[in-house]
Image (spheres, rainbow, N blue to C red):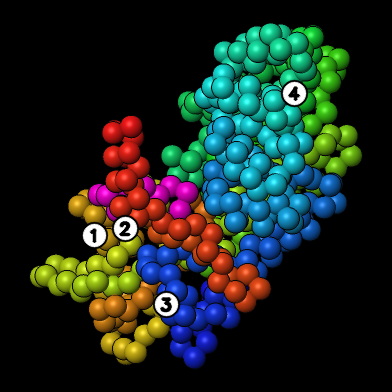
Amino acid sequence: MNPLGFKYNNGELCCDEIPISKIVNNHKTPLYIYSSNNLISSYKKLKEEVNNLDVDILFALKSNSTIGIVKLLAEQGAGADIVSGGELKIAQASKIQPSKIVFSGVGKTEEEINHCIASKIKQFNVESQSELDKIISIANNLNTKVPVSLRINPDIEVDTHKKIATGSNSTKFGLPIDQAISLYQRINIEKNIKPMGLAIHIGSQIFNNLEFKTAYQSLLRVANNLREKGCKVPNLDLGGGVGVNYENFEVDFTGFGKTIYEIFKGQGYSLSIEPGRCLVANSGILIAKTIYLKRNNKKNFIIVDAAMNDFIRPTLYEANHKIALVKSSSVEKEKFDIVGPICETGDYFTKDIILPTPNENDLIVIFSVGAYGSVMSSNYNSRPPASEVMIQNQKIQLLKKSQSIEEKIKSEISHLIG
């Protein structure tokens, strides 16, 4: 089984009915390819599951900030969860209304705060007392009302990779509940702060809805407590984190939606969620070309033209993505490590995978790379990162052209010589 939008026809993988070989003929490898059908379908599935509470969907741009992707989601009705001034500009370029933009993150600069205030975004999700002090000072200097929500930290451990767990007080994220209650009472009396409510986000790749339930129950208790103290708490931002199974591509939108409904039905709060990975992961694939086959007395290697600078998740998170050949004529199978050209032992995509033996120039596909793929790419080893295309209305649409090394050199030299 492959994700929606990707299937084999006549022995060759296609994206939205277009053969991968045809796409690669127009755009060289390594290459990100997105299915617009998959992306739209994922958004609609999530929207359907939360529609009974009229939940705002704010796409987490950190998962994929390619404008063509963000714009397509915006056309479906998505807002934006941003974590930088750069992401604000991406959201604006993608035609997302300011009233549907929320600014999260622990290190908002004064410049970013001023830009977001001027842009009239929906709210700031504040994550520390120092940040709150800064926003209050700016708001008073401008003599303008600034919308503020506080991100609480329920101090719970979730079953996910330690680098993407954000729900305990040992991480840099959010405010301890006692401190959040005290600070929220403060913002309710600040003349230039508009209290917007509370936010939460406990991590990414969460498959057990009981972990969401525990976090949301904690959030609801704090919100109700504040209301009992006479505070205005209009909105609750529930964050994201819905897991994507990279083996079978399943996403439990239904269980997530039921959890939200069970806890917040009839509670009188406006709700928003911040999905990222669960919307875009399965919409993207990375195509790489086999450069060499290498064998020694311990390992067989497929060396491809993509590398960790294009897709770093296996190196950074030990992530296992489904990998296959785009088209295979071989019946023999062998065990391989699939690796890139970068001078790091950690530059690999998978280890000990059994595949039909490829030939040089054969194409391989890495699935479910639409989230935290291109957005985390780099020029390491002076390699230009992969270009990106999307199949939309049976046409190949270029989303992002890779900056060539010549272009990079020119920009640096022009800077040096003025």
Give the distance between the C-alpha atoms of the residues marked 3 and 4, in whole angstroms: 50 Å
Dots 2 and 3: beta carbons under 8 Å?
no
Judge whether residue 379 can be spotted in this image.
Answer: yes
What residue did someone put label 4 on?
147
Q: Measured from the top left, where is residue 163 in percent x and y?
A: 43, 39
Which badge, 1 or 4, comes first in the chain's sequence? 4
The span shown in magenta is 373-384
Which badge, 4 or 2, comes first in the chain's sequence? 4
Q: Is residue 206 above or below residue 163?
A: below
Of 164 and 369, the residue lying toward us: 369
Dots 1 and 2: beta carbons under 8 Å?
yes
The amino acid type of the residue labelled 1 equals: Pro
Give the distance between the C-alpha atoms of the residues marked 1 and 2, in whole angstroms: 6 Å
- The verdict on residue 37 being magenta is no
Which badge, 2 or 3, comes first in the chain's sequence? 3
The amino acid type of the residue labelled 2 equals: Ala
What residue did someone put label 1 on?
341
Please identify the quadrant where the N terminus is shown: bottom right
Residue at left offset 48%, top offset 28%? 171
Q: Indicate which label's residue lies in the foreground, 2 or 3.
A: 3
What residue did someone put label 2 on?
307
Of 92 and 273, the residue lying toward us: 92
